Image (cartoon, grey):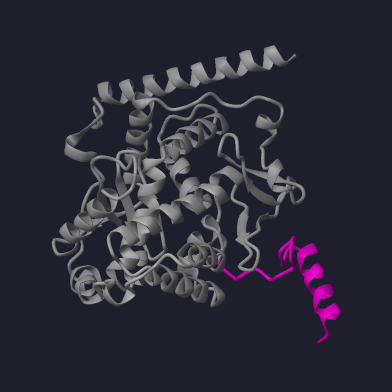
Amino acid sequence: MDVSTLADRRRADAASGDGCPRCGEAFPAFPPVTTPSFGGRALRRCLRCGTRVALGGPAGHVVFTCESCGLPFLADALLPHAEHRCEECAVGRVPPELPDGDISAAAENEVRDALASRWRFVTSPVAQPYLDRIARSVAARIESAPKSVRVVLVSAPEHRSLALPSGTLLVSTGLLEFLEDEAELAFLLGHEIAHAGSGEVAVRLVRLGFRATARERGASDGLCWSDAAVDLVRLGYGRKRERDADARALSALLSLEYEPQSAIRYLERLHGAAERSDPSVAEAIVSHAAPRDRTRRIERALYGRVTGLEVARVNRDVFRRAAGRAALRGSLVPTELDAPHGTAWGVPTVLEPEGKMLRTGVLIGAALAAAALVALATWLLL
């Protein structure tokens, strides 16, 4: 098959929804990855150029992340990097800076309550102290990281990770079993801690929660907040924020004298799993940049910078004994997603009516304030 014939076939696949609209590459044949934000439409990411699409439905099909508000949106066609702005932000209706500490705390507690009935959380008496120790050592090397970090395991085969604003790091057992050494674990945790430390998690959860609330017309059964968490896990933070999180995780890896090639090996295995259309990696592929793109950026960052690799550590045997596949199997027991130390930022974490009313009141007040500021901005622009 010559080059022109291959190009024609790729364009035909793209037009039919089977290929990337930018380069024509066929998408991995994953089971559908869906998100509440896009009404259950199947999401795909090109492994070659990283373009994301939402298949089906009458609206736009190319997925972008707004560089102003950070929320995902759909467009009818490919946009230049300078024009990655959602419709609201493009016309000047940029949401106010959110959240402050109380709103962030209330939102996180709503997310915790909602996920408690949606995901199954587990712990291991062998792995838990080890995971928390590695998380704390990595957090100590990342600027503005939450003061208290800990790892909570989600019983799921999918590769799933999410940092909450307080520093709780949700990691699926499937993802943990995919890792091969402690250096890979440190890179993964560093990536999530970087998101939490930059404040992106709090902003995104609050804005996604408010948008879900508006979409569900004020539903208050917790579904909106679990939807916000699912959106964040499956859509990520956008190109620039994900690259920054990788860069900060890599810096932590180097400062702790881990072998940086471990991060590259992890990403190469992730790419291989995606090429095989392994369903367990579908969420991770859709939410993050293409693994090969991440690898190239890490290699450029390391060029001429790394010395003494002969003494860099990976701690493979330690990792396998404490948190590897064999160590986890048979040692996992159910647990709950409680807030650290029983309270968070002065907002009750229990489910009594008064605690729920306080959290809901904080969020409603924030939503009304946000709506008022947006309305004022719109009036000024008229």
When the figure is inspected, residue 379 is found, relative to residue 157, above or below; the finding is above
Q: Locate the C terminus by quadrant.
A: top right
- Residue 277 placement: quadrant: bottom right
For the image, the number of numbered tags is 0
Give the magenta-colored segment's residue range.
1-30
Horizontal side of residue 319 vs 194, given as left or right:
left
Q: Position of residue 254 (x, y in %)?
A: 34, 61
- 12 is within the stretch colored magenta: yes
Pick the front one: 276 or 350: 276
Which of these two is toward me, 321 or 172? 321
* Residue sitting at x 70%, y 34%: 87
Residue 162 located within the stretch drawn in magenta: no
Percent across and percent down for residue 68 are: 60, 35
Asked if residue 242 shows in the view, the reply is yes
Name the residue: 41% across, 63% down.
159
The image quarter in which residue 318 lies:
bottom left
Q: Is residue 290 above or below residue 84?
A: below
| Residue most extreme to the left | 125
User: 288 or 26: which is nearer to us?
Assistant: 288
Q: From the top left corner, tell me how far across and down residue 99 is, in percent.
A: 43, 27
Image quarter in which the N terminus is found = bottom right
Position of residue 228 relative to residue 17, above or below, is: above
> In this view of the protein, can residue 118 be seen by the observer?
no
Q: Is residue 369 above or below residue 308?
A: above
Residue 155 position, x and y percent, is 31, 60
Left or right: residue 183 compared with residue 3: left
Which residue is at a point 60% across and 39% down the rendered structure image? 67
